[in-house]
Image: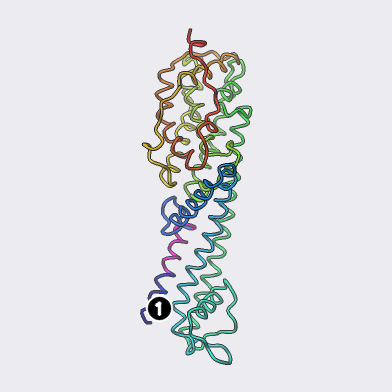
Amino acid sequence: MDLEQFLGAGVMLLFLADIFFTVLYARAGTGLLAPRWSRLVWAVVSCASRLSSRHRSTILSFAGPLIVVSLIAFWALGLTLGAALIIRPELGTSIRPSSGYTPTDFMTALLVAGNSLSIVGGGDYSPHASGTRLLFLINSLIGASVLSLVLSYLVQVYSALRERNALALTADLMTGGTGDAAEMLARLGPGGDFSNASSELSNLARSLALTKEAHHFYPLLFYFRFEEPLYSVSRMTFVLLDLTTLIDTALDQQKHAALVRSAPVASLRQCTRLLLATLDRNFPTPDERQTGSRNRDFEGSYAAAVSVLRGAGVETKLDAARYADQRNQWERQVRRVAPTLGYDMKEIDCRRPLKEAAIFT
């Protein structure tokens, strides 16, 4: 083997390792090339979306599918390039057509490599030595294996995406389509009866845990952005964290102790924070100094939530200071994530603040 062939073997091993860590090892942030490629494509689509503010949401919604298609093409091209570097020195000697002259240029090597990997057709070139026969056999096995692995990976990604959307839609429906966690809490305990709330929240926590792990296994999911804000991970996590914060700070701690201290509420809070943290670590989110936590009208938002709860007959015991403190902790992550995916905080936080004097006096 000469230097060119060693280089080709190295390129193939690099791309095979990337496929292994992305598809088989399946951990967020472990890919060698795929995470960087995904971020590059996302950056290009994001820049293109800024050219048309009117259609920005629509343009960004194509990012996920484009990343999938381009990533497959990137892997195919990388494997073909590596195989071509190995094959080119053998053209005209141990690799040649059944008859006629054998070109030895690199484009011919690419065609033969593609044929040996079963990616594209490459004419009637065939190996005529034991080493090149073994090379063609290995290439065909690599091509078939990679194709089946990638197809299986895509099925899993889109299955997880459907489950994430189902969870986001469920959470939105539980708010009555308002995106307001106070509405969800009021519906969980109509007239102050929260006897069934724990089981409902337990189902949500279970679905959320599956969604969190899906994003840990398939970080490509973070790049699938829909035009409707209700499907946004940012909005879903905002609503669920606001819900658990209201349970902790607005309900009567003694009367509703079974709900406030229940495992589903704690699980929902912790799992939502873990999902946000996974996205924040593995997605190109801006620095906190660029977004700022902007401790805005939390009191007014809290007053509006309490108004909704009291209107539904839910007995409350107020602690506005603790609500503001808890919300300030988790909203920082939401504010980093939401703009990165092209959402405005007005689309994420749907509750209109209320003058606190109307409630607290």
For the N terminus, the quadrant is: bottom left
Image coordinates of residue 288 in percent, x first then y, are: 38, 37
Image coordinates of residue 263 in percent, x first then y, are: 48, 29
Residue 14 left/right relative to 100: left
Q: Which residue is mark 1?
A: 5
- Tell me which corner region of the image, top left, top right, bottom left or bottom right, holds residue 140: bottom right
In the image, residue 10 above or below residue 18? below
Asked if residue 218 can be seen in this view, the reply is: no
Magenta: main secondary structure equals helix
In the image, residue 205 above or below residue 159? above
Identify the residue shown where x is 57% and y is 56%: 154
Q: Would you say residue 78 sits in the magenta stretch? A: no
Asked if residue 123 can be seen in this view, the reply is: yes
* Type of the residue with mark 1: Gln
Q: Which residues are magenta?
A: 13-23
Question: Which secondary structure, mark 1?
Answer: helix
In the image, residue 212 above or below residue 105? above
